[in-house]
Image (cartoon, rainbow, N blue to C red):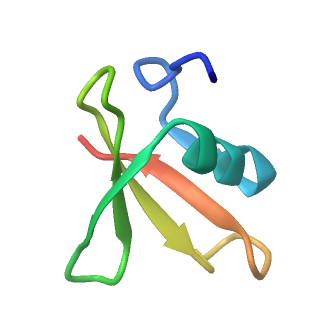
């Protein structure tokens, strides 16, 4: 089990983001902009998953904590 870091992290990218998605977060829905929204069951914090975000290389997953 992965230690929850949702309260201290704001953005994750690359392999770290993919691992955190796979091992810690639950998928909830897709928002109106095509981003997948994920949920941490320990903290109730939500994360948006962006694919091919601007400023990153191709095929990079980026997770941003939703405020």
- Horizontally, is 44 left or right of 11 in the view? left
In this rendering, the answer to whether 40 lies above or below 38 is: above
Q: Percent x, y for residue 56?
A: 72, 70
Count the marks.
0
- Horizontally, is 22 left or right of 67 in the view? right
Q: Quadrant of the C terminus?
A: top left
Q: Quadrant of the N terminus?
A: top right
Q: Nearer the viewer, residue 22 or 11?
A: 22
- Residue 45 quadrant: top left
Residue at image location 59% in from the left, 16% down from the top: 3
Q: Nearer the viewer, residue 1 or 36?
A: 1
- Horizontally, is 39 left or right of 64 in the view? left
Residue at image location 79% in from the left, 52% down from the top: 15
In this rendering, the answer to whether 10 lies above or below 6 is: below
- Residue 27 quadrant: bottom left
Residue at image location 28% in from the left, 82% down from the top: 33
Q: Percent x, y for residue 43?
A: 29, 22
In this rendering, the answer to whether 5 lies above or below 13 is: above
Seen from this angle, which residue lies furthest front?
1
Q: Percent x, y for residue 2?
A: 63, 23
In this rendering, the answer to whether 25 lies above or below 54 is: above
- Horizontally, is 66 left or right of 57 in the view? left
Residue at image location 79% in from the left, 75% down from the top: 57
- Residue 55 quadrant: bottom right
Q: Percent x, y for residue 16?
A: 74, 44
């Amino acid at each position: 089990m992965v230690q929850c870091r949702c309260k201290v992290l704001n953005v994750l990218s690359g392999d770290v983001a993919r691992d955190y998605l796979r091992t810690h977060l639950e998928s909830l829905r897709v928002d109106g902009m095509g981003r997948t929204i994920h949920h941490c069951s320990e903290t109730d914090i939500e994360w948006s998953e962006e694919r091919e975000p601007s400023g990153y290389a191709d095929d990079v997953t980026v997770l941003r904590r939703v405020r």
